[in-house]
């Protein structure tokens, strides 16, 4: 009922006939947290902020002949500052409302084609196994998360899922044209294999950046383990990323531990251990969440260590 009322309000705000928006879904969550961090043995800092809070809506329309038109718009929001203002400074502007996702597309028996700002093929194929965290990254993923000006094709053929994207140069992203391909295969009911390739053209005479990776996940009941790697090559510079995850669900509680490594093959290497625990309270959509991360930065033998502890409340609708 609440979503129907909100969907009607969205339709009115957009100036669209309510009847044409019958398939609108509204969603979102607010995630506020206390973050305690320290680096190199120095004094710790404690901050309260928001992380990943958002709201969005999806709408679809039947075009007939097995075709469906759709749109997806998602906005990121901050809960610790006024819209258009930063903290207590009433004269400063900040990006408190931003477009995370903004796509329009069509789907049918051929698959789906979406154009706009969206999750990248590399992340959907490989990155989901390398950085599933809510607050602190594991530190073993170096690819795109969301990309602008992207045309993406997806389809599933039995146990095989395919994703292709083409990215048009976006000055705001500071990168050139790019493309990617990703393939996931449910090789067994309990085993998933995935591989992806991504390339971004260099701008201003810069070298192209190529990323190649693979992942494997094995599940047993409510438990799973995964291992994923990818390398990032820009000219003669190469960085290797890897993540190993173990996780599972225990009633209303989900948890995983991740081990990540980033190595630029030039003396700069870091290892991370990340623990994630979230607990749903009485099935209400409210979650109590903890994430902790310990980073061991080995830079030419020098230590560059840090720790993070995050405790948050997340309410989804």
Image (cartoon, helix red, strand yellow):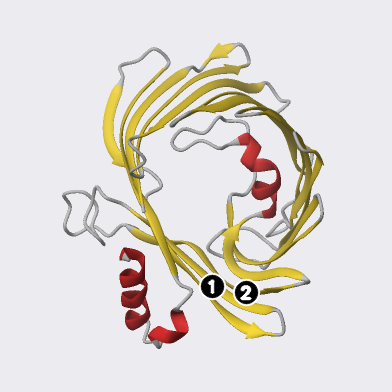
Q: Relative to 103, is 226 above or below?
A: above
Q: How many marks?
A: 2
- Can residue 142 be seen here? no
* Residue position for label 1: 71
Q: Relative to 94, is 291 above or below?
A: above
- For the C terminus, which image quadrant? bottom left
Q: Position of residue 114 (x, y in %)?
A: 64, 70
| Residue drawn at (50%, 18%) of the image | 304
Q: Relative to 41, is 280 above or below?
A: below
Is residue 83 toward the left or the right of residue 161 in the image? Answer: left
Choose top left, top right, bottom left or bottom right for residue 14: bottom left
Q: Assign a secondary structure to mark 1.
A: strand
Choose top left, top right, bottom left or bottom right for residue 185: top right
* Residue position for label 2: 105
- Can residue 222 be seen here? yes
State yes or no: discs 2 and 1 in contact (Cβ < 8 Å): yes
Choose top left, top right, bottom left or bottom right for residue 10: bottom left
Q: Position of residue 120 (x, y in %)?
A: 64, 55
- For the N terminus, which image quadrant? bottom left
């Amino acid at each position: 009922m609440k979503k129907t009322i909100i969907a009607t309000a969205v339709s009115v705000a957009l100036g669209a006939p309510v009847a044409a928006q019958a398939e609108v879904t509204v969603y979102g969550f607010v995630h506020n947290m206390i973050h305690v961090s320290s680096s190199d043995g120095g004094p710790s800092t404690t901050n309260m902020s928001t992380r990943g809070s958002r709201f969005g809506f999806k709408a679809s329309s039947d075009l007939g002949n097995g075709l469906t038109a759709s749109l997806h718009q998602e906005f990121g929001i901050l809960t610790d500052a006024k819209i258009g203002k930063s903290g207590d400074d009433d004269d400063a502007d900040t990006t408190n409302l931003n477009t995370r996702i903004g796509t329009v597309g069509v789907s049918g028996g051929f698959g789906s084609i979406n154009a706009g700002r969206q999750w990248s093929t590399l992340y959907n194929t490989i990155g989901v196994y390398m950085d599933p965290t809510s607050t602190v990254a594991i530190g073993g993923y170096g690819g795109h998360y969301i990309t602008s000006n992207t045309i993406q094709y997806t389809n599933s053929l039995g146990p095989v899922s395919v994703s292709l994207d083409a990215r048009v140069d976006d000055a705001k992203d500071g990168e050139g044209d790019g493309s990617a391909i990703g393939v996931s295969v449910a090789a067994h009911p309990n085993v998933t294999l995935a591989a992806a390739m991504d390339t971004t053209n260099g701008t201003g005479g810069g070298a192209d950046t190529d990323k190649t990776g693979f992942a494997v996940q094995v599940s047993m009941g409510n438990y799973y383990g995964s291992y994923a790697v990818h390398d990032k090559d820009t000219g003669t510079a190469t960085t290797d990323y890897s993540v190993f995850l173990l996780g599972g669900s225990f009633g209303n509680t989900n948890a995983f531990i991740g081990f990540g490594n980033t190595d630029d093959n030039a003396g700069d290497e870091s290892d991370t251990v990340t623990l994630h625990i979230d607990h749903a309270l009485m099935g209400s959509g409210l979650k109590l969440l903890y994430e902790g991360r310990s980073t061991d930065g080995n830079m030419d033998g020098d230590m560059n260590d840090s720790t993070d502890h995050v405790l948050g409340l997340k309410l989804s609708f």
